[in-house]
Structures are given as C-alpha cells and as structure tokens.
Amino acid sequence: MNLYNFCKPQHLILLLAFSFALTVNTNQLIGQQIEVPRINTMPDIPEPYHMRDWQAVAHGYDSLVFNEDLSGQYLPVLFFRDQSVNYPDYQSFGLHTAIGTNYPTSGEAINVIPAVVGATLAGIDKSGQFNKNWALMAREFFNKRPEENIYLNHPVTHSGHDWWYETMPNIFYMQLKYLYPEIAVFDEQLPVMANRWKEAVMAMGASDTPWQVPYMNYRAWNMSEMETLDSGVRQPEAAGALAWIFYNTYVATGDARYLKAAEWAMEFL
C-alpha cells in the first residue's frame, strides 16, 4: 500500500488551494528568506545523527497492544466485547485509552481505529492477524441508530459534546475503508454516514437554491436534535474535517451531492 495514494493529498490540496486562492494573490506566496548569520552556521543535518526506526516502533507497538496473552499489572491493554451493541452477532474489541484505567472496558475510537490504520500502513495485515479481523471489528464504533448513524468515539454515545471527537472517528473509518475495500459493511455504512452529516450541514443553513453557505462556528452539533452546542471553545475548523469526509465520499461514490456538500463546508472555512 502506497502512503501517497492512501492519503490522497492531491484531493485535499486542491480543496485547500482553491479556498486559499480566493483571498490571497499567488504572487504574495513567493517567500523571501531573510539571511540570519547565526542560523547559517548551523548544519542542515547535525552530526552525529540517528533517525529512530519508526517502522520497527510501529511493529513493536502493534505486537504489544494487540497481544491478548500478556500478563502482569495492567496487562493486557486489549479487551473484547463478545456481545456487541451495533452488530450484536459479532465480536468487537477495544484498547485501553490509559494504562491502569478505571474504565477497563472503555476504548475510544480515536485510539482503536488509528491503531489498526497505522499498523496497516506499517505493512501489517489487520484483516487476519492472530486469526482475527481487527479491521472488521472496528465497525462497532458506527452508532447504528437513526438519531446518530455516524461513527463516534464510543459504540454507544451521543453527538453534541465536542466536534473533534465526533468528526475524527469518521475520518479514521474512511481511512480504514480505503485500506480494506473488501469489507462490505464499510460500503454499507458510507452513504448512511455521509447523508447524516449532509442533513446536519443543511440544518446549519446550507442551500443550493439559492446558494447559501452554512454557519458552522460551533463547539459541536447534536445529530439527534439537529441543534448546536454554543458553550465552551468553538471549533469552526471542524468544517475542514467535514469537507474532507464529503469530498472523499464523492471520490468513493461519484455522487455529486457530496462534492456540493464539500464545497459548502470549504466556503464556510
């Protein structure tokens, strides 16, 4: 798997460049480096220098956190749910967010799914490792309820608390879907998830007749009530996360409705 293809940077770059070009003259982007004599004496590559073997670190981390046979204080950090909630006929798993946690059966999507994605990028096939399909088991974070129907940080929780925790699990899921295209349930989840976010953006004021950009300067968005959370630190940059979700859904499906939704989010951003 090629990391360049996985990240699809050309897609995100095109979106960002288009938005940036609306307000900035490209001639202003030509940087002029100021010579700083003291800085000029510093080597580009220090000596001695040793780059840590991050491939080995990734493999070592994977062999630790996915080892269910470890014993000792706070070990293993892996646990299973034999009776899942969103897909009750199938097993799911979690990883402890913190070592020595007071909540031993609580594992966050923002930890679990990237652990599978990262291991895959390091060359580990997580669809059959230790006779388990870790990638497939991550489907449990899809809160399969009409009032939510998006990926959230826990299998059973509610949106409307913090936009970061409510957009990132969906991004991580889409990365996992890209890496494991053979997992059919990911294909089933995609339009449901994307349509739900599209409904939310339209509830924020998006319209195409006439064209109207949604207002997205909130702390979070409650999907079940289609209401905002305005208290606390606002996170308007979540519009960028939603643009990424919409655009990559468009790339995966070819459905122009998601491209339009990406444009709404980018125009607000």
Image: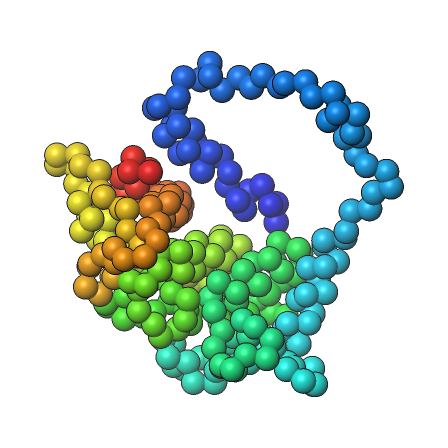
Residue at 80 percent across and 30 percent down: it is 43
Q: Image check: 104 left or right of 184?
A: right
Along the viewing direction, whichever of 135 and 213 lies nearer the viewer: 213
Tell me if residue 227 comes above or below residue 129 in the rendering. above
Q: Position of residue 72 (x, y in %)?
A: 70, 85
Q: Position of residue 179 (x, y in %)?
A: 53, 55
Q: Quadrant of the C terminus?
A: top left
Residue at 16 percent across and 41 percent down: it is 207
Quarter of the image holding residue 123? bottom right
Q: Quick check: can you spot residue 246?
A: no
Along the viewing direction, whichever of 239 and 131 lies nearer the viewer: 239
Q: Residue furthest front?
A: 38
Tell me if residue 87 comes above or below residue 167 in the rendering. below
Q: Image check: 256 left or right of 167?
A: left
Q: Position of residue 36 (x, y in %)?
A: 69, 21
Q: Residue furthest top?
A: 27
Q: Image check: 232 left or right of 40?
A: left
Quarter of the image holding residue 193? bottom left
Quarter of the image holding residue 149? bottom left
Q: How is the image coloured?
A: rainbow
Tell me if residue 254 comes above or below residue 32 in the rendering. below
Residue at 18 percent across and 51 percent down: it is 203
Q: Position of residue 255 (x, y in %)?
A: 30, 44
Residue at 25 percent across and 55 percent down: it is 230
Q: Quick check: can you spot residue 35?
A: yes
